[in-house]
Amino acid sequence: VTDGTSRVFPPTLAELEAEAEVAASPAAWDYLAHGSGDESTMRENVVAWTRWKLRPQVLRDMGDVRTSTTVLGIDVDAPILIAPTAMHRFVCDDGELATARAAVRANTIYIVSMAATTSLEAVAAEAPDSARWAQMYMLRDRGRTRALAERAGAAGYRAVVASVDGAAVPRRSRLAGGALVPPDTFRFPNLASPDDPHNTNLMAMVSDFDPTVTFDDLALFEEWSGLPVVVKGVMRGDDAARCVDAGAAAIAISNHGGRTLDGVAATADVLPEIADAVAGRAEVYVDGGIRNGVDVLRAVALGAQAVLIGRPVLWGLAVDGADGAVAVLHHLAEELGRAMALCGRDRVDLLTRDLLLGAT
Ligand SMILES: Cc1cc2nc3c(=O)[nH]c(=O)nc-3n(C[C@H](O)[C@H](O)[C@H](O)COP(=O)(O)O)c2cc1C
């Protein structure tokens, strides 16, 4: 597949993953590839999508297939967004600035991580005309989260993504002793305390996450930023309904790519329950193990408005910087378009559960 970018893109993301492992430093690879515990949830995320079998329709006019859609009223070329992931400088010298450029070129939304190695403001300046969302955790010192939410609003971000899976620091098996100390040249301008701006001990900073946060606190993110709130890390229908009752504009189903608690269900398996519980009152997104366009089709057919892509974007960045990340996004969108044509549905909003065996 050629992408109009500088190199020939490998035919599958699995091959790109293998190239990325070679391109990345061993420390960076351990960090991005690992999951928690035995990594069973991480593996299951990938496998669970494949259990949903397609029931294609034929003999429909597929002369004009379009993957474009909207998320929170924002036009995107495909229902494929960039998940918030930490430390893009670990895989690419330009770090989050490269990701910002990739998002513009793929016309999608980049969700900037609280643990980014670039400030929200610098990412905004790199891609001023694109839509960006800012991910954050509630910190024990809530004033720091408030300051970040205010910065997101001021810097033109379009939503706050409040991650709610941080009640305890996860155990990550591949990292020596479960700990990680990034290179001391890194800075965390969205996460580090103003009292300690040069702190590079990400694991220590992660223990600043507030374990007492509840549904009642969700409104604070909107109050502080003036932006709609996406709640990321929901895995049950009842929780999703409570988030919507508490004012969430969207729910992002996620088990953090299998990086928090091993043994948690695959996101593909809980998506139908959550979509039913939300019942159109908010948008639903899903991430975890989405590795090809058919997985994107499955997710949308099961009720997701869009998917978030985590590791594959990092593989693209590791192999070829912004060009690599664009290639990943284009590759997934192109596969989605082909899968739509072969399923007899030419618009994203026509992807419905009857396309999947046993899903109705
Ligand atoms: C290296 C890495 C760093 C991550 N950092 C964050 C983060 O800072 N905040 C967050 O909400 N999620 C974070 N995540 C989780 C992703 O947003 C997403 O839920 C997950 O990667 C999706 O699974 P996938 O990698 O299989 O696509 C991270 C994931 C990875 C792989």
Image (cartoon, helix red, strand yellow):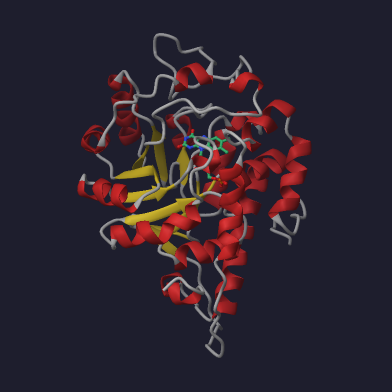
Percent coordinates x, y for residue 278 in the rendering: 29, 58
Viewer-nearest residue: 103 or 52: 52
Q: Residue placed at 39% from the left, 24% from the top?
A: 209
Viewer-nearest residue: 179 or 194: 179
Percent coordinates x, y for residue 345 in the rendering: 50, 78
Percent coordinates x, y for residue 303 in the rendering: 40, 64
Residue 108 visible in the picture: no
Quadrant of res 219? top left
Viewer-nearest residue: 128 or 148: 148
Q: Please, is residue 234 above or below residue 280 in the view?
A: above
203 sits to left or right of 93: left
299 sits to left or right of 14: left
Residue 91 visible in the picture: yes
Q: Residue placed at 73% from the left, 33% from the top?
A: 24
Q: Residue placed at 62% from the left, 41% from the top?
A: 314
Please count the marks in the image. 0
